[in-house]
Image (tube, helix red, strand yellow):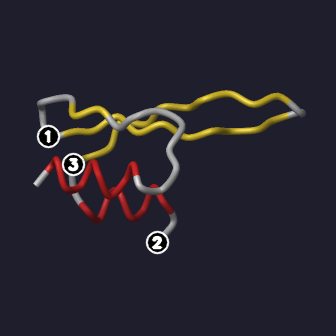
Amino acid sequence: MNANLIAWIDSHDRPEATIDNGDGTLTVSTVCVANGASFIERDVIPATLAAARDLLGY
């Protein structure tokens, strides 16, 4: 399941590949912009479709 979930998350133009942490969580990266500067933020989420949808704004 995680491979399919990771592929689905990564199909949403993430700046870095999603990482399976092996403990039921995923590390997902997002580009953020603040005060004219951009940076990558990494979030650790449960490896569930509901958590991924929440992070992606679905």
Q: Earlier in the sequence, mark 2 or mark 3?
A: 3
Left or right, 35 with respect to 46, comes to: right
Query: Crowding near pointer 1: few (<14 within 10 Å), some, many (20+)?
Result: few
* Local secondary structure at mark 3: loop
Answer with the quarter of the image where residue 24 lies.
Answer: top left
Identify the image quadrant of the N terminus: bottom left
Q: Which residue is mark 3?
A: 47
CA separation in Å, label 2 and label 1: 21 Å
Query: Crowding near pointer 2: few (<14 within 10 Å), some, many (20+)?
Result: few
Please state which amino acid type lies under the numbered disc 3: Ala
Q: Which residue is mark 1?
A: 24
Please state which amino acid type lies under the numbered disc 1: Gly
- Determine whether label 1 and label 3 are within 8 Å by CB: yes
Query: Crowding near pointer 3: few (<14 within 10 Å), some, many (20+)?
Result: many
Residue 26, percent across and down? 28, 38
CA separation in Å, label 2 and label 3: 16 Å
Please state which amino acid type lies under the numbered disc 2: Tyr
Answer with the quarter of the image where residue 5 lies.
Answer: bottom left
Q: Which residue is mark 2?
A: 58
Residue in the foreground of this view, choosing between 45 and 20: 20
**Residue found at x 15% / y 48%:** 2
**Residue found at x 88% / y 33%:** 35
Q: Is residue 19 above or below residue 4?
A: above
Answer with the quarter of the image where residue 20 lies.
Answer: top left
**Residue found at x 42% / y 62%:** 54
* Local secondary structure at mark 2: loop
* Local secondary structure at mark 1: loop
Residue 3, percent across and down? 17, 48
Residue in the foreground of this view, choosing between 25 and 16: 16
CA separation in Å, label 1 and label 3: 5 Å
